[in-house]
Image: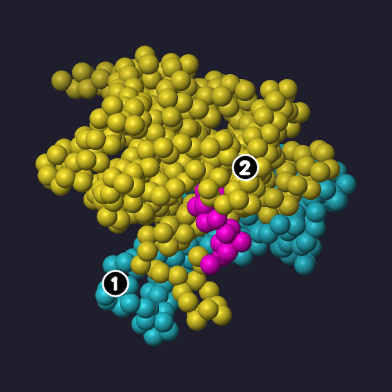
Chain colours: A cyan, B yellow
């Protein structure tokens, strides 16, 4: 995975972060990502991210479950082994509803969680570069990706002007890799490689 | 943009004390990072001992058969299925808190949802033991799942409520586990990023799946939580409905009633909230989480206990009324001889049920009692005893004296091994709960941070100043215009 250069600004409060995100975008910087300790409503819109399609995926998994249950039970009771249960109809739809419902929910939930993990590239032993370890505690971390045009010093000064408290420059891999967090030498002091 | 978000001042704060984001992390992660106390070890060892006794009891049952439990004709379902329904019911409160209250946007759920969901998972694990070991030849347990086999293929009967139960309970367990674990991911990452010990970095690094807190991930996480909540809501209602079908679709007097599904669901939520109260009143004290599980939370949950207890009471009375009004002699016998007649062999259990479930929760009409921790803890135990007796009354009093008096088995008593199995599931439940409270954040850290600026005591105080000022300014301006 390519190693890129990032300017990292940490904010103490989401109320400062919001206008900063807007200003940074309008100033033409490329925001790599914003890392926050909790979900912040509206931040995805402020960053220009599109709405997730995870719901649609969940719906598709759900109807897969529905059809699996109905076709499975229907085939078993009508074609594979048509047992006579006290003279009841072989196509006994009302009695299939509980299992059909349960399988709908099961397929939808399991499918969505797996899709979520796939989309976010999350699994046990997956490692990612963390720009600021306190972004899971109390810091709101905005990461600007340096392109050929970006002037780092200017970017740092800009972040300071929009209210960032702690600013540094890091070289980091953008993707994920397999690894263990305890193999880091000093992960709790880790701030990336300071450049320049 | 204001630093805090608006919430009506009528609503009391649900995060007490002068908190900021970092303080929340510190408070909730502290029990994980400290060594366990003597109290924890004592409780944990007792739980493990109970679990061992349970394993021993079950081993006897596997070797000698269900006769070890004094099951007989006609009491084929005794303590075992009573315990099964009781444990499943307890699980329901967790899903109600995590899913239904999420859909209803109840902020107070954030303080209690993590522990309640954990309780759900452990309770369903305990519940599952009973039907499995009750099968007798437990090594054949996989026969209940539909898979192509060399016997035909001979499939299970999908029209049977017992088969529905297999699907309902296993789906319920899976979905609850996924929902709980997805919620845990960000908080495990918080613990990971603070970790200094090697094993802790390894364990939480693995368990948090590389969570980074990226905005896109949060967006997906929120969508996932919302849809899982939407799925869990009908799921939790369906699970106890299907459990009630085990009885309601039979033709046993006392079981064959259409009121069972709502009555069972209300009872499940009722007993589940009682168990949540028992666990959280102790947890908040031992883990020093009084600022996050406040009296407000206890109060609100007691209101739900009062509501569901009263629904259950109405259901009991409706059953009695219909037994009388329906004029079916067998139904009448089941209700007025086997249950309501205090002089019948098991009549006393009916009055324990009535007293614990219908009469005692009425105390919670009074605010003073709802906010009394000692009373609430006592009541939560009483309610769980009452709800156990409800299942016992429904199951055993319906079948120990039915159509043919020559086969009445009025001598049904549990054996020590049947009781031992029940105690063993307590062991399993508390072993899991103790481990959970030591190694996982008992409160959803990210969710508490999310509501801090709206419902935190310090932020609400600041808001009230601002709010009063603006009202005064408005009144002032308005007065000048006229």
The residue that disc 2 covers is B57
Residues marked 1 and 2 touching at CB (< 8 Å):
no
Could you say whether the residue bearing mark 1 is in a helix, strand or loop?
A: loop
Q: State left or right for residue B327 relative to residue A144.
A: left
Question: Which residue appears at 28% of the width and 27% of the height?
Answer: B342
Give the farthest residue toward the top. Answer: B368
Q: Mark 2 lies on which chain?
A: B
Residue drawn 47% across and 18% down?
B373
- The residue nearer to you, when weighing B87 against B285, is B87
Q: Mark 1 points at which residue?
A: A86
Q: Give the range drawn in magenta.
A: B129-143
Q: In this view, does B186 lie above or below B317?
A: below
Badge 2 crowding class, 10 Å Cα cut-off, few under 14, some 14 to 19, many 20 or more, is many
Quadrant for residue A13, please give it. top right
Image location of residue A138, percent across then percent down: 64, 36
In the drawing, does residue B88 fall left or right of residue A97? right
Query: Which one is in front, A193 or A150?
Result: A193
Give the left or right position of residue B339, taking residue B20 as reference.
left
B370 inside magenta stretch: no
Which secondary structure lies at badge 2?
helix
B473 horizontally vs B93: left or right: left
Q: Foreground: B43 or A24?
A: B43
């Amino acid at each position: 995975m390519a190693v890129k250069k990032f300017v990292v600004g940490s904010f103490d409060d989401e109320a400062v972060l919001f206008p900063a995100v807007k200003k940074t975008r309008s100033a033409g910087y490329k925001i790599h990502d914003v890392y926050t300790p909790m979900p912040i409503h509206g931040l995805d819109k402020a960053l220009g991210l599109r709405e997730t399609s995870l719901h649609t995926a969940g719906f598709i998994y759900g109807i897969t479950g529905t059809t699996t249950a109905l076709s499975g039970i229907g085939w078993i009771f009508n074609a594979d082994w048509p047992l006579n249960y006290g003279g009841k109809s072989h196509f006994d739809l009302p009695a299939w509803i509980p299992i059909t419902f349960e399988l709908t929910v099961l397929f939808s939930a399991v499918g969505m969680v797996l899709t979520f993990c796939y989309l976010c590239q999350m699994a046990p032993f997956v490692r990612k570069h963390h720009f600021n370890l306190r972004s899971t505690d109390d810091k709101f971390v905005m990461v600007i990706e340096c392109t050929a045009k970006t002037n780092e010093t200017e970017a740092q000064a800009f972040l300071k002007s929009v209210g960032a408290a702690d600013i540094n420059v890091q070289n980091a891999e953008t993707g994920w890799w397999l690894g263990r967090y305890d193999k880091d030498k000093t992960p709790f002091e880790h701030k990336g490689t300071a450049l320049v | 943009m204001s630093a805090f978000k608006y919430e009506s001042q009528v609503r009391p704060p649900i995060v007490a004390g002068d908190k900021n984001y970092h303080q929340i992390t510190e408070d909730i992660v502290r029990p994980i990072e400290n060594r366990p106390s003597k109290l924890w070890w004592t409780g944990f060892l007792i739980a493990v001992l109970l679990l061992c006794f349970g394993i021993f009891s079950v081993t006897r049952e596997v070797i000698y058969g269900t006769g070890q439990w004094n099951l007989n004709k006609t009491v084929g379902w005794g303590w075992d299925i009573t315990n099964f329904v009781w444990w499943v019911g307890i699980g329901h409160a967790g899903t109600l808190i995590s899913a239904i209250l999420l859909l209803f946007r109840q902020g107070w759920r954030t303080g209690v949802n993590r522990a309640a969901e954990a309780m759900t998972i452990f309770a369903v694990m305990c519940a599952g033991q009973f039907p499995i070991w009750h099968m007798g030849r437990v090594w054949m347990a996989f026969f209940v799942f539909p898979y192509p086999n060399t016997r035909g293929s001979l499939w299970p009967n999908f029209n049977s409520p017992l088969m529905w139960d297999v699907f309902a309970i296993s789906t319920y367990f899976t979905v609850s586990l996924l929902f709980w674990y997805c919620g845990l991911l960000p908080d495990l990452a918080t613990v990971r990023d603070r970790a200094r010990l090697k094993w802790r970095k390894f364990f939480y690094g693995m368990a948090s799946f590389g969570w980074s807190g990226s905005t896109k991930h949060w967006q997906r996480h929120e969508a996932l939580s919302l849809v899982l909540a939407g799925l869990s809501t009908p799921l939790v209602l369906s699970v106890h409905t299907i459990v009630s079908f085990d009885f309601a679709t039979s033709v046993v007097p006392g079981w064959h009633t259409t009121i069972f599904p709502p009555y069972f669901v209300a009872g499940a939520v009722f007993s589940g909230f009682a168990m949540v109260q028992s666990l959280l009143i102790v947890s908040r004290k031992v883990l020093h989480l009084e600022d996050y599980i406040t009296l407000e939370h206890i109060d609100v949950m007691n209101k739900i206990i009062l509501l569901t207890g009263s629904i259950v009471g109405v259901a009991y009375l409706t059953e009695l009324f219909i037994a009388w009004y329906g004029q079916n002699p067998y139904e009448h016998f089941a209700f007025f001889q086997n249950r309501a007649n205090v002089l019948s062999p098991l009549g006393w259990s009916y009055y324990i049920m009535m007293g614990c479930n219908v009469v005692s929760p009425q105390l919670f009409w009074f605010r003073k009692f709802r906010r009394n921790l000692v009373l609430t803890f006592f009541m939560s135990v009483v309610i769980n005893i009452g709800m156990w007796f409800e299942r016992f009354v429904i199951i055993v009093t319906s079948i120990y004296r039915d159509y043919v008096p020559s086969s009445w088995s009025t001598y049904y008593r549990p054996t020590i091994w049947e009781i031992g199995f029940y105690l063993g599931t307590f062991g399993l439940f508390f072993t899991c709960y103790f481990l959970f409270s030591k190694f996982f954040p008992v409160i959803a850290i990210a969710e508490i941070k999310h509501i801090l600026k709206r419902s935190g005591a310090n932020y609400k105080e600041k808001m009230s100043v601002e709010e009063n000022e603006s009202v005064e300014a408005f009144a002032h301006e308005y007065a000048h215009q006229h």
